Amino acid sequence: MSTTAKTTATKGKKYDGFTEEERDAMKERAKELKTSARRGTKTDPESDVLAKIAEMSESDRVIAERLHAVIKTNAPALTPKLWYGMPAYARDGKVVCFFQSAAKFKTRYATLGFSDGANLDEGAIWPTSFALTELTADDEARIGALVKQAVS
């Protein structure tokens, strides 16, 4: 029996490989690619990011707005863009860091993540994502330093 055909003993439902939230994120990514292809590089995608942030629940929105400001201040070379329906920041078209709201994936915390394009290597092991429940001034300073390192 394939993995997708297995049923879970606890819920009696079939597992189809992706959660509803994951499927929605993939649909948003496809929509982003179509929009990008239609408009080309003539417009600034930052307005799309700010609009997506404005749609978030209050707790996620507050964090996303602060992250946006911290990233823009500390890594002005990064370009804001939507990535799977969430704010992301890219260099030469490749995502360096991104935000995932808690509400979108029904988790207890939002996430700031870094892709493999981020220069955060420290030996053989280093963090690539951080759980966020709020942002203090110290947190913002730490994130600012991480973003600077990521683009160095």
Image: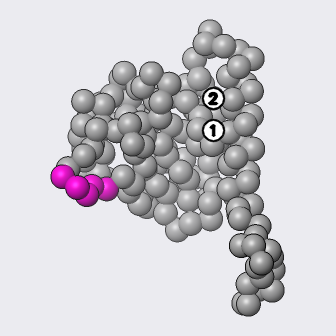
* Range covered by the magenta-colored residues: 123-127
Quadrant location of the N terminus in the rendered image:
bottom right
Instruction: Say which quarter of the image contains residue 12.
Output: bottom right
**With respect to residue 21, does 65 lie above or below?**
above
Residue 48: mark: 2
Is disc 2 in contact with disc 1, using a CB cutoff of under 8 Å? yes
Q: Residue at x 74, y 34 (%)?
A: 31
**Mark 1 closeness class: few <14, some 14–19, many ≥20 residues within 10 Å:** some
Q: Residue at x 50, y 25 (%)?
A: 93
Query: Given the image, on which type of amino acid does mark 1 rest?
Result: Lys
The answer to whether residue 54 is seen in the rendering is no
Query: Given the image, on which type of amino acid does mark 2 rest?
Result: Asp
The answer to whether residue 34 is seen in the rendering is yes
Q: Secondary structure at mark 1?
A: helix
Q: Percent position (x, y) of residue 15?
A: 75, 73
Residue extending farthest bottom: 9
Q: Which residue is mark 1?
A: 52
Q: Secondary structure at mark 2?
A: helix
Q: Residue at x 50, y 37 (%)?
A: 88
117 or 146, which is in the foreground?
117
Q: Percent position (x, y) of residue 81?
A: 55, 30
Residue extending farthest top: 42
